Amino acid sequence: MSRPFDLSLYLVTDEDLAGPRGVVETVRAAIDGGVTLVQHRFKQGSTRDFVATASALVDLLRPRGIPLIINDRVDVALAVDADGVHVGQSDMRVAKVRELIGPDRILGLSAAQMHELTPEELGPIDYLGVGPVFATSTKPNAPDPIGFEHLGRVKRTVGLPVVAIGGLKPEHVEPTLAAGADGLAIVSAIIAAEDPAAAARDFSTRIARYRGK
Ligand code: TZP
């Protein structure tokens, strides 16, 4: 059983989009707006820098009870005692990741299509990242967009928590949740926003409103 997590507003970092403000300060602002989970994704630079930023994010997020998930790198997740790891289907196999991170940390997997997923892949994971829902320039090699209908089909088939990703803006909160997703994973609409707190708040307010809170 992994530790508890809430996929509602899932922020994915991007050092290019954060710009001179930097990833840690951007995340600090965004969590004021109601982010429920952070995935640290590091595309370039040294492992030492990745560990340093990840460690600063643990210090920022742990006292606030917001889990930190590390993209792809199990070694970095263990080095900073992160709450989990997120992998894609060409990264280390999820069974091996689970063996390395133990039963308690959160394990997520990205997939666009349900038919890409085997029972061996679904067994060890805690949630699935599904997308891109829409075309996105944040991940240039992303597969073709799947849309809300397919998102809903994946959710109904997998029987696991699902977070939607790819091109999502505040106006997509309602159709994404209506399709059955448990939350929205956002990169540019929050990280590149002039005011990341306000951008995150726009999402979190709409999520709460949709859920009647
Ligand atoms: N995986 C699928 S799409 C994507 C990732 C990491 C990028 C989504 O970024 P944005 O800026 O929210 O469209």
Image (cartoon, rainbow, N blue to C red):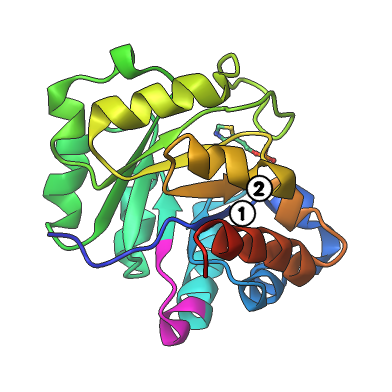
The residue most toward the bottom is 63
Residue at coordinates 48% horizontally, 82% vertically from top-left? 59
> Disc 1, disc 2: CB below 8 Å?
yes
Q: Is residue 1 above or below residue 157?
A: below
Q: CA distance from mark 1 to mark 2?
A: 6 Å
Q: Is residue 18 above or below residue 174?
A: below
**Tag 2 residue:** 187
Task: Classify the position of the N terminus by image quarter.
Answer: bottom left
**Tag 1 residue:** 13
Which disc number belongs to residue 51?
Answer: none
The residue carrying mark 2 has its beta carbon less than 8 Å from ligand 1: yes
**Badge 1: few (under 14), some or many (20 or more) residues near its Cα, within 10 Å?**
many
The answer to which of 49 and 20 lies nearer the viewer is 20
Residue type at mark 2: give it.
Val
Give residue 4's position: percent from left, percent from top: 27, 67
Q: Is residue 61 above or below residue 179?
A: below
Give residue 5's position: percent from left, percent from top: 33, 63
The answer to which of 18 and 127 lies nearer the viewer is 127
Quick check: 132 left or right of 7?
right
Quick check: 15 left or right of 125?
right
Residue at coordinates 60% horizontally, 45% vertically from top-left? 174
Mark 1 element type: loop
Mark nearer the viewer, 1 or 2: 2
Residue type at mark 1: give it.
Thr
* Span highlighted in magenta in the image: 61-68
- Sequence-wise, which precedes: disc 1 or disc 2? 1
Mark 2 element type: loop
Question: Residue 159 appears in which quarter of the rendering?
Answer: top left
Report the label total: 2
Ligand 1 is located in which of the four quadrants? top right
